[in-house]
Image (cartoon, rainbow, N blue to C red):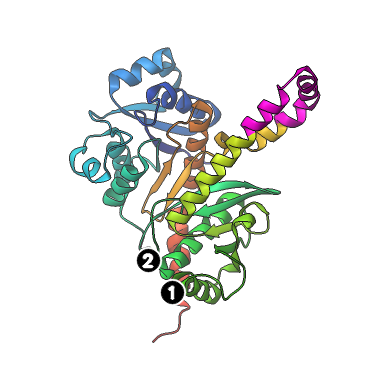
Amino acid sequence: MAKSFTIAVDAMSGDHGVVVCVPAALTALRELPLLEVLLVGEPGAINRALGSAATSFAGRLHVVAASQVVAMHEHPRDAVRRKKDSSMRVAINQVKSGKAQACVSAGNTGALMAIAHFVLRTLPGIERAAIISVIPAAGGHTYMLDLGANASATAEQLLQFGVMGSIVAAELARLTKPRVGLLNIGEEDIKGHEIVQAAHRLLQASALNYVGFVEGTDIFSGEVDVVVTDGFTGNVALKSMEGIAGLIGLTMRQEFTRHAGRKLMGLCAWPALKAVRERFDPRRYNGASMVGLAGIVIKSHGGADQLAFAQAIRTAVLEAEQDVPRRIVDVLMAQHSKEPAT
């Protein structure tokens, strides 16, 4: 972190609000000496959560007042129209005004996307923003988008998702030519509906390192860096992964505590089991980017604990360092300049 960045934190967001968001922000401030944080929300609640820690970061930590909170199940339209002084809206306003380089919220995903779209708008050349996150995979991880921002997508929008995903993977994972795949029901060129087929042709004709159709198993194979799909399919896939991970964890706990012999085996295997748990700990991957907006907005899981929310703040800092929105615009402009005139 060579220069200072300011991150606006929706301190009232998520299942736990200031109880998690404020300590997580303090963790990030300790780790990153050049970081500044704007804690947005009800000043009384924020200051109580800060306690004496506020004096330790004088000049780097500021409280921005907001009188409303967007509920986790509030309709996005109501959040946009009726919650103009919500902590979520005010935090995004900090990015719009230039007072912050990124915003982090654990709030209602639909409301966050709607407010971010309304306040920041999308980048030139991007029709819709998408949600991108990192998924554990063999030998590292895979970036996947869209994970729920758009229930459907056109072929052109899927191409734009591919461009944005490739840039995020290149900038955040330092990959020279990220391998981009389009999620389908099979790898054969003849498979898939019309939109997927049309997107396939557009991606083939693009400057991306496009490897073709990929299946669900390829997400974890380590043979692709970016997986592109619509938000409906992506969200179902993500929730399925979370469910399977939970089931495996539950089953292992049951089997290793079934009787004394199994408990002894569990103790012997504990170092390996601990390493596996840490490698696939979802808190280490928390922080999905709403990529394609004219500003950086990071969505933390609503149930995130302090460790997970701090990771979302780190993601925001990393995207701000790499200026991901500007990189997307640069690549799109370069791509369009190479297109033949009609």
Residue designated by label 2: 125
Instruction: Tell me where residue 204 sits by quadrant.
Output: bottom right
Q: Mark 1 touching mark 2, by CB under 8 A?
A: yes
Does residue 186 appear left or right of residue 147 in this picture? right
Q: Nearer the viewer, residue 254 or 193?
A: 254
- Say which quadrant the N terminus sits in: top right
- Residue found at the very far left of the displayed protein: 82
291 relative to 209, above or below: above
- Say which quadrant the C terminus sits in: bottom left
Asked if residue 323 can be seen in this view, the reply is no
Main secondary structure of the magenta stretch:
helix
- Residue found at x 45% / y 18%: 56
Instruction: Tell me where residue 84 sits by quadrant.
Output: top left
Decide whether residue 131 is among the magenta residues: no
Residue type highlighted by circle 2:
Gly
Decide whether residue 271 is among the magenta residues: yes
Helix, strand or loop status at disc 1: helix
Residue type highlighted by circle 1:
His
- Residue found at x 70% / y 21%: 257
190 relative to 263, above or below: below
19 relative to 212, above or below: above
Residue designated by label 1: 336
- Residue found at the very far bottom of the displayed protein: 342
- Residue found at the very far top of the displayed protein: 52
- Residue found at x 55% / y 40%: 243
Label 1 Cα neighbours within 10 Å, binned few <14 / some 14-19 / many ≥20: few
Tell me which segment is drawn in magenta.
249-274
